Amino acid sequence: MDNKLKESYKTISEVVDILNTNNPNKQNNQSYTIRYWETQFKQIKPIKINNRRYYNHKNINILLKIQYLLKDQGMTINGVKKILSRNNLDIDEKDKKIISSLDIKFRLSKISNLLKSIKKN
């Protein structure tokens, strides 16, 4: 692999470091998490050379988006798949509003269930 290509692609361990650095919740992402996400999200397509994975900038941005939606917003894998399937791989204001409203609905549902359980006791 030439130097220019090495600069534009990151190994899976470098991507793990990027995800851990960019995660405000400081949740520890390991390489097995990234490999699992590869099986779940067809948008992640690293190149493989000698059984090593190399991720380009686009793949890293998709992984950051997946991390944000799963870890920070509490979405499910299927929910993230729906957002990614729109072929718009940038989180835009519309996505943020959808995510925010889903987050609010989820939290309200949890509060409602908690109140119901308290009333029963």
Image (cartoon, grey):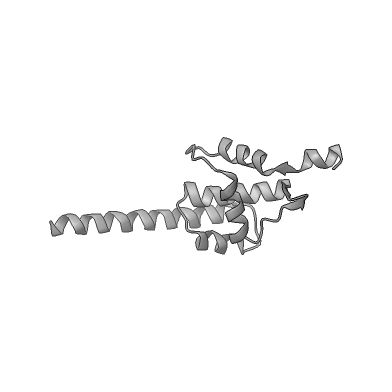
Q: Taking 55 as reference, is 113 above or below it?
A: below
Q: Position of residue 83 (x, y in %)?
A: 57, 60
- Left or right, 26 with respect to 113, comes to right
Q: Name the outermost residue toward the left.
A: 121
- Left or right, 71 with respect to 7, comes to left
Residue pictured at 66% horizontal, 44% vertical: 12
- Left or right, 28 with respect to 5, comes to left
Residue pictured at 54% horizontal, 59% vertical: 80
> 45 or 74, which lies in front?
45
The answer to which quarter of the image holds residue 104 is bottom left
For the image shown, how many numbered marks are present on the structure? 0
Residue pictured at 48% horizontal, 55% vertical: 99
Q: Taking 31 as reference, is 113 above or below it?
A: below
Q: Position of residue 114 (x, y in %)?
A: 24, 55
Q: Position of residue 49 (x, y in %)?
A: 78, 50
> 96 or 49, which lies in front?
49
> 68 or 94, which lies in front?
68
The answer to which quarter of the image holds residue 121 is bottom left
The answer to which quarter of the image holds residue 43 is bottom right
Quarter that holds the N terminus: top right
Q: Position of residue 60 (x, y in %)?
A: 66, 46
Q: Name the outermost residue toward the front.
A: 50
